[in-house]
Image (cartoon, grey):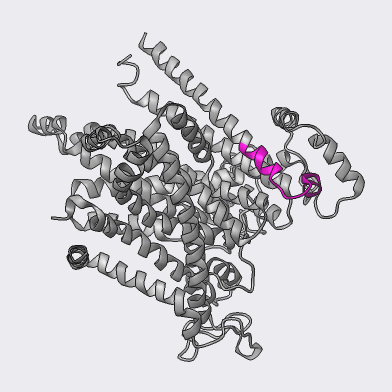
Amino acid sequence: MSEFLKHLRYVLTENPVTLIAGTMFVLLIVAAIIGPAIVPYDPMASSASQSLKAPSWEHWFGTDQLGRDVFSRIVVATRLDLSIAVSAVAISFVFGSILGSLAGFFGGWVDRIVGRITDTIMAFPLFVLAMGIVAALGNSVENIVYATAIINLPFYARVSRTEVNIRRSSDFVLAARLAGNSSLRLLATHIYPNTLPPLMVQVSLNMGWAILNAAGLSFIGLGVRPPTAEWGIMVAEGAGYIVSGEWWLAIFPGLALMLAVFTFNLLGDGLRDLIDPRRRT
Amino acid sequence: MKRNDKLRIIFGRLTQAIPSIIGIIIVTFILTRALPGDPAVYFAGPAATEKSIQEIRTSLGLDKSMLEQFWIYASNLASGDLGVSVSTGLSVKEELIRRLPASLELTFLALLFSIGVALPLGIAAATRPNSWVDQLCRIVVTAGVSLPVFFTGLFMVYLFYYILGIAPAPLGRLDIIYLSPPSVTGFYTIDALLDGDIETFGAALSQMILPAITLGIFTLAPLARMTRGAMLQVLSSDFIRTARASGLKRSTVLYTYAFRNALLPILTTLGMVFSFMLGSNVLVEKVFAWPGIGSFAIEALIVSDYAAVQGFVLAMAILYVLLNLTIDIIYTLVDPRVGLES
């Protein structure tokens, strides 16, 4: 474990960009966990006398059309935005990697069926498919999660299929097979753990895309509904005020969204260095 | 002989698209039947009468078995029947066809912009690794995928319309003081040119610039990254070294030898770029009140107009398959190696 920490320190100090991404990641997590407890204003409290005030010392990011504090709303929204993305990515990671591993290990008709499923999903422009799924399942936050999970499934299935396939007949697997392990045991305990590093990089890169996707869906009015604080819907609500110069309503939540996505994308590259055993010397 | 081979390969690609299309039809069928409760009620819309619901139930064949229902669905599709949009009262097919040119015009201009920026940037970054161009390319690539497309759009509206005042109001394809040009292709810029009306052409183009750049920035990233990667790989290969050693001009080596070979992986990325583009099109259309099929779908989603939404999903998917097919065929025609091996 101490070796892992040493490596972690090495990775963080070697590349300052990863360090910045790591710090922003911690900030996001902190905001998601204790955000509602530390914000200066109630994110739901409206006040007619305070509506559409520009950013000031009192309201860092200004106030919206109902006089709600934009900064407080952005911080509180972190939890909802991150939990949508985390649940969606977790679902597609679990199902995608299991399907992909089975396809890569057994080949044959299993491979063909999994391949057909992923190809069919990929035959759609993905955001459009997500719209269709939410429209069909019903307009709720849960269904945003399912839709995002479904459109991300092929990426995990493909990565783990390739990773399992190239290890299927490598020497350490053959040795384990000779030692009398069953096929499923080989896959679960010998091959699958080795496919995790590339999958983890995929998870991190995918998180950013999942956040963007969920925010995009709520921007067009699906899933999260007002007055809930969520970045996509805050940008949508602020969009109408841009043309009259009240930029802070839409720009700040948009920036929060961008920073979150940026963090996960940068983290993906850092994570690759951290987990890849070939670099651990 | 060689020509026949290429034709045979192109035919093979065409048949490969059939399973995709079947898959798409099955998925959209499942989506319409996944509606909770009675699909007929959803398709008839919120203001439906008992009689209209009954009519839709018979036309969808909801009292029959799933297999029969699928058959009815597929044969309706084959005859081009996508149902009726309850929000506009017109058939979904007509609505989509009427609005498609607006979306396509925007997408093509965005694609031109993103190719026009991404290719030179990628080539410059690859020929001078670790220079400022390379760093710029890296920043653009990382920022491009992190920027929510609707945020970029709004920011540009604020900057170019509100602060600088050089862009027109983000309200559709043409300012209301202009009349839309006589429709030939449905593309306002081309129609205006055909009509010889330069002023309308300028107005239509200026409305399109901001949304097209917004859409282009988002798709620039994968293209620039691929161009850089492909060029780096080709430039380090033996035949480039030989070409250089033979004393060929730098530009000949770069464009005639290296770029042509790097073009193939770039062409395959275009498929992914289109997936991004068709999806973000919806968001860009909402930001700029662009009257394309994306805004149509959003309006339909809000009033629970299911036939319209499903028609939109199906149309986009078929369009995407066709675009991928076109890329495959161009690939076959461009790549001199295809057809020689077999």
- Left or right, A155 with reference to B341: right
Q: Is residue A6 magenta?
A: no
**Residue located at (37% from left, 34% from top):** A105
- Left or right, A82 with reference to A185: right
- Left or right, B253 with reference to B149: left
Tell which of A111 and A138 is nearer to you: A111
Q: Give the prevailing secondary structure in the magenta stretch.
A: helix
Tell which of B185 and B158 is nearer to you: B158
x, y percent for residue B177? 66, 59
Q: Quadrant of the N terminus of chain B?
A: top left
Q: How many marks?
A: 0
Report the magenta residues as a range.
Answer: B27-44
x, y percent for residue B77? 70, 31
- Left or right, B1 with reference to B50: left
Residue at the front extreme of this rendering: A180
- Vertical position of residue B338 compared to residue B129: above or below: above
Tell which of B220 and B77 is nearer to you: B77
Residue A53 showing in the rendered view: yes
x, y percent for residue A279? 17, 53
**Residue located at (64% from left, 37% from top):** B184
x, y percent for residue B102? 60, 46
Residue at the right extreme of this rendering: B51
- Vertical position of residue B160 compared to residue B79: above or below: below
Res B147 → quadrant: bottom left
Residue A155 showing in the rendered view: no
Q: Quadrant of the C terminus of chain B?
A: top left
